[in-house]
Image: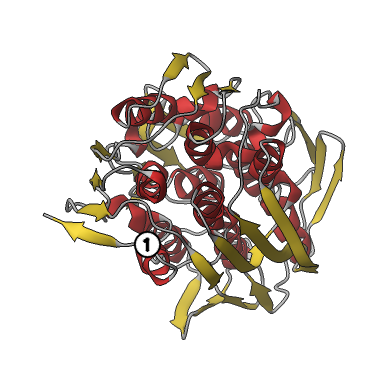
Amino acid sequence: MISETINHQAACNNTINGTINVPGDKSISHRAIIISSIAEGRTQINQYLDSEDINATIDACLQINAEIKKNDGSLIITGNNLQRIQRENIELNFGNSGTSMRLMMGILSAQKFSSTLTGDESLTQRPMNRVSKPLIKMNANIETSNGTAPVTINPTDDIKNVDHIINIPSAQIKSSIILAGLYGQDAFRITTPQSRDHTEIMLKEFGSKISLKSNAIKITPNKLTSPNTIYIPGDISSAAFFIVGSIISKDSQIKIENVGLNPLRTGFIDILKMMGATIDITDLKKVNGEAVGNINVQSSKLKGITIPKDLITRSIDELPLIVLAASQAEGKTSLRNAEELRVKESDRISSMVTMMERFEISIDEFSDGMNVYGGTIKGKKVNSFGDHRVAMTALIASLVSEGDIIVEDTINIETSFPEFIEIANNIGMNIQAYD
């Protein structure tokens, strides 16, 4: 797991141009690996994201007797056919990956061995009782450390499926419940506000009896059968850095090919269009149930807006970039109803407010968001707060800064987008390691 400290310096006031591909979607990679590991048969996963977070999921799935081999950029996985594995007790370190820990809590709840789940300093501060409580209702034997990790999971006789009402729009919570419920006997429902639905889409590819109606999901447990091959589209959250970079910088134009365009992940595109950005989607198609296409974007003049509440969940991971875009817009941008940002890899409301203040951008902080006033970013030294998305957002800010930007503690970029700096430099940026 990541422990060393690395800093980077980004040269100011560049343009970016070109056609790029971004690595495979992190959210879909997690789910493809986990579901392949509990299915019957052999699955080849093409263009998965090879990153620290995904390797944490691979390590966990190896502990439930899935066979996993890396082969020329793909994964070959032979699943355990929903067996409840019996083995010696284990401790799993998930590093910085909240998705890995929360989804695997559902799987590990059904196993016949005890497991202790821990992670880095950031992950052990993030809430886990929002997942453990509904799993305990299903007869899981779970103990948290005052609602956070380390999490201890002991064997239980049976997973008992019950209906759930989840008020938080969280893909991780519902996914953990669904994965645990696959080991139960009875059909069950989850009623919850909409959130990204990669788990539901992936399970359908494996033949799961899962149906969606409005805000209700119905699952009838059955055997999962491998579809043989899964293709992972490019990660729209990774593409977002270059989308915003192209919009805010002068004389820039970027095409990003084969990007996942799940409608529950494209809220930030809708926000940017409301602000005046020129963004076009081409060659839209479906691959393994997921919408995939090309994104074309160019320099645009932005205006401040009040971001609609219904777009927050659909853009939660990209909101740091929306803050950056707002700093280059004319007037005020109001971002509220985003309290979920407080429990990400860092407190992203506090992190982004601190960064913008350091950049000499006027900003007001609220418990659930902020107001951002357009201005000129000054080249400064800033900290990533151990957060990969904050680190990359700060580096992208150099495209419009007066003076270079130095970002401290950038090793966390490896958790989600190891190729970020290479791609950025290939299209016109100048980011170098800084002592």
Report the quarter where the C terminus lies: bottom left
**Viewer can see residue 291:** no
Give the residue pinned by disc 1.
Answer: 429
- Kindly identify the residue that appears in the image at 67 percent across and 78 percent down: 229
Would residue 202 be found to the left or right of residue 239 on screen?
A: right
- Find numbered disc 1 in the image and state the secondary structure of the residue it sits on: loop
Residue 99 locus on image (x, y percent): 50, 46
Image height check: is 111 above or below 154?
A: below
Query: In the displayed image of the protein, which residue is found farthest to the right?
Result: 213
State the image coordinates of residue 360 (x, y, percent, origin top left).
Answer: 33, 27
Left or right of residue 300, residue 8 in this image: left
Q: Is residue 333 above or below residue 80?
A: above
* Residue 262 against residue 332 in the figure, above or below: below
Answer yes or no: is residue 370 visible. Answer: yes
Considering only vertical position in the picture, is 234 above or below 175?
below
Residue at image point 46% right, 33% down: 142
Relative image position of residue 198 (x, y in whole percent): 68, 53
Residue furthest front as drawn: 251
Q: Residue 342 placed where, x, y %?
A: 45, 25
Residue situated in front as seen by the camera: 232 or 252: 252
Q: Amino acid at mark 1?
A: Met
Identify the image quadrant of the N terminus. bottom left
